[in-house]
Image (tube, rainbow, N blue to C red):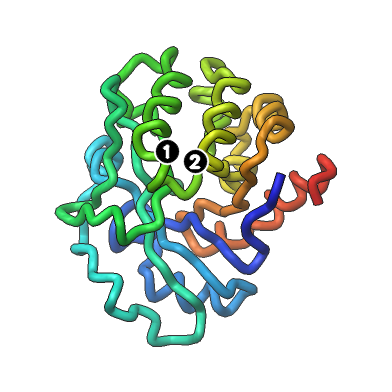
Amino acid sequence: MKILNTMSEDYHIHSINYSDGLNTIDEIVQYAHKIWLKKIIITDHSQVALDAEKIELKNYRISLKRRVNVHNDLDVKFGVEWDLIDDEWNCCFEIGRNHSIEEYFCILSCHDNAYKWDLKNITQAYINAIEKYHDKIKFIWHICNKKTSQYLDIPKIAEVLNKYNIPIEINCSYLKLDRTDTSKLDQLLKLLKSGVYVNTDAHCLTDLHLKELGFQYLKDRGYL
Ligand SMILES: [Zn+2]
Ligand SMILES: [Zn+2]
């Protein structure tokens, strides 16, 4: 199992510009550079998650061709945290009117307030969404979260992830908040051939420091 990013790369961060983060992209860019980060991807929530939480969109998404970092040499890219939404295995991958999924780094996630099917069928929902969108998904969000983990069939999930070589995420915020089903996560890590990303899922600047938790988790289990 490979670890696909380093301490200096965080590929899951939220901003106030496009979803529920507390800080602007400019603040994130400056602070991330001030600590140890060299590359970040701002992956705000999809429109269906914003609607479920009644969060207004503050800005239109700008073209990726426009450079946003005027502060430093931090590499800044953009992504979208997709949501699984229904039993047709549709995903919401847009924020506002912008749904140019080819342009963005796409994470597949599932929030129970945006997901409209029976949570008991979550394994099949993930499998079908992966079958449908595997060429666009960069990694699966924090799949072993406690809200859905009891319904998660780990061997089946591992099989489809390995089939399409899709990594999972070690989500440092969810480790910190004790929202991780660690027995399921450990089971999945043992079966996974595709690899993991260690990301903070930062919603404020202090969250960017959580990165060490994920690496420590992997170290404690002998993966580092
Ligand atoms: Zn959020
Ligand atoms: Zn997130």
In the picture, the quarter occupied by the N terminus is top right
Mark 1 touching mark 2, by CB under 8 A? yes
The residue nearer to you, when weighing 199 against 173, is 199
Count residues near mark 1 (Cα–Cα under 10 Å), then give few for <14, some for 14-19, many for 20+. many
Q: Nearer the viewer, mark 1 or mark 2?
A: 2
Residue type indicated by callout 2:
Ile
Residue that mark 1 sits on: 109
Identity of the residue drawn at 51% across and 38% down:
164
Residue 53 showing in the rendered view: no
Q: Residue furthest left?
A: 97
Q: Specify which label sits upstream in the sequence, 1 or 2.
A: 1
Identity of the residue drawn at 36% across and 68% down:
24
Identity of the residue drawn at 28% across and 76% down:
65
Count residues near mark 2 (Cα–Cα under 10 Å), then give few for <14, some for 14-19, many for 20+. many
Residue type indicated by callout 1:
Ser
For ligand 2, tell me if the residue under mark 1 lies within 8 Å. Answer: yes
x, y (%) of residue 20? 35, 52
Q: Is residue 27 above or below residue 51?
A: below
Distance from disc 1 to disc 2, alpha carbons, whole Å, reads 6 Å
The quarter of the picture where residue 25 lies is bottom left
x, y (%) of residue 193? 67, 39
For ligand 2, tell me if the residue under mark 2 lies within 8 Å. Answer: no
Residue that mark 2 sits on: 140
